């Protein structure tokens, strides 16, 4: 099942199930209600997909944990710093808390922060938690990063903070696990990232070092997960400009006027203009 949060032609918010090119309206007033198990019946109404505005699947998640689960990406970052991956990374999944107040939906512009000249994308997949602390579905995630800001603040020994605080894009829809090639706790699909229509990277999501059940178990340790909590996979190998160069075939750090699209089979396309 593919689920969306949307605004109808009159501007009213809703939750729907995709049925071809139509959005079948569900009784749940918001996705977090559906994730709790409420409002799963249909209202009998439907809209053309082209006639609604898609929002982030969970526009206001209770929390956003972004993991660091792809060894190739982690190793590339440490090489740039002249080091090697610490043993602690292999011992348990590592994550940071991102900002649930800065979630962006499909097509929603991201403003380049005034403090940065090194704006980067990050190609990720996210799991969304449902009732019982289990994964209810997956979606695409673009963890925008201000690399120069991040680089400076991380010297303090805390963070990332403002280098990641301003925008995380989610969407275009939430896909239940039964609709995806999931085996050994990993998604068996290839994801891509393009800037201004030019593909810059293609990456195998199954290369994830820690499985999704391991990420969920670690996130839940000594606390509780709530319906709507978002768990990011971390950047797929080769999934950001920091790792790619940043100069790839004439590309550079993201600038106002650029458009970033991340995509994966079944999960759709998540496009974000930079302003």
Image: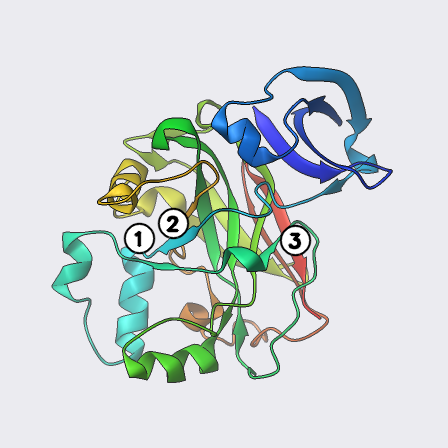
Q: Is residue 266 visible?
A: no
Q: Quadrant of the C terminus?
A: bottom right
Q: Quadrant of the N terminus?
A: top right
Q: Is residue 64 left or right of residue 170?
A: left
Q: Secondary structure at mark 1?
A: loop
Q: Mark 2 or mark 3: which comes first in sequence?
A: 2
In percent of width and height, residue 174 lies at: 55, 35
Q: CA distance from mark 2 to mark 1?
A: 6 Å
In percent of width and height, residue 124 lies at: 46, 52
- Residue tagged by mark 1? 69
In the rendered view, tell whether residue 214 sits above or below residue 104. Answer: above
Q: Mark 3 or mark 1: which comes first in sequence?
A: 1
Q: CA distance from mark 2 to mark 3?
A: 19 Å
In the rendered view, tell whether residue 21 sits above or below residue 117. Answer: above
- Residue tagged by mark 3? 271
Q: Secondary structure at mark 3?
A: strand
In percent of width and height, residue 179 lies at: 49, 25
Instruction: Tell whether label 3 touches label 2 (CB within 8 Å).
Output: no
Q: Secondary structure at mark 2?
A: loop
Q: Nearer the viewer, residue 35 or 262?
A: 35
- Residue tagged by mark 2? 233
Picture quadrant where residue 16 is located = top right
Counting other residues with Cα less than 10 Å from the Cα at mark 1, is it few (<14), some (14-19), or many (20 or more)?
A: many
Q: Is residue 47 visible?
A: yes
Q: Mark 2 or mark 1: which comes first in sequence?
A: 1
Q: Is residue 103 left or right of residue 90?
A: right
In percent of width and height, residue 242 lies at: 43, 72
Q: CA distance from mark 3 to mark 1?
A: 23 Å
Give the tally of numbered discs. 3
Instruction: Tell whether label 1 touches label 2 (CB within 8 Å).
Output: yes
Q: Is residue 254 left or right of residue 68?
A: right
């Amino acid at each position: 099942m593919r689920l969306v949060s949307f605004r109808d032609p009159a501007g009213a918010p809703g939750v729907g199930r995709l049925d071809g090119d139509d959005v079948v309206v569900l009784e749940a007033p918001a996705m977090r209600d559906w994730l709790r198990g409420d409002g799963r019946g249909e209202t009998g109404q439907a809209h053309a997909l082209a006639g609604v505005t898609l929002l982030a699947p969970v526009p206001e998640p209770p929390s956003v944990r972004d993991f660091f689960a792809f060894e190739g990406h982690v190793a590339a970052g440490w090489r740039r710093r002249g080091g090697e991956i610490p043993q602690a990374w292999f011992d348990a999944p590592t994550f940071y808390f991102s900002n649930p107040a800065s979630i962006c939906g499909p097509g929603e512009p991201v403003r380049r922060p005034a403090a940065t000249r090194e704006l980067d994308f990050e190609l990720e997949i996210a799991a969304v938690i449902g009732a019982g602390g289990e994964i209810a579905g997956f979606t695409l995630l673009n963890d925008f990063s201000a690399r120069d800001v991040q680089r400076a603040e991380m010297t303090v020994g805390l963070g990332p903070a403002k280098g990641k605080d301003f925008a995380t894009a989610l969407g275009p829809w939430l896909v239940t696990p039964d609709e995806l090639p999931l085996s050994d706790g990993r998604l068996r699909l290839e994801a891509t990232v393009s800037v201004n229509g030019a593909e810059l990277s293609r990456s195998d999501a199954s290369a994830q070092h820690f499985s999704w059940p391991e990420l969920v178990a670690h996130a839940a340790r000594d606390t509780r997960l709530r319906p709507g909590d978002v768990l990011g996979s971390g950047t797929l190998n080769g999934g950001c400009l920091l790792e790619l160069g940043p100069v790839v075939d004439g590309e550079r750090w993201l600038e106002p006027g650029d458009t970033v699209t991340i995509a994966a089979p079944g999960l759709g396309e998540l496009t974000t203009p930079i302003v």
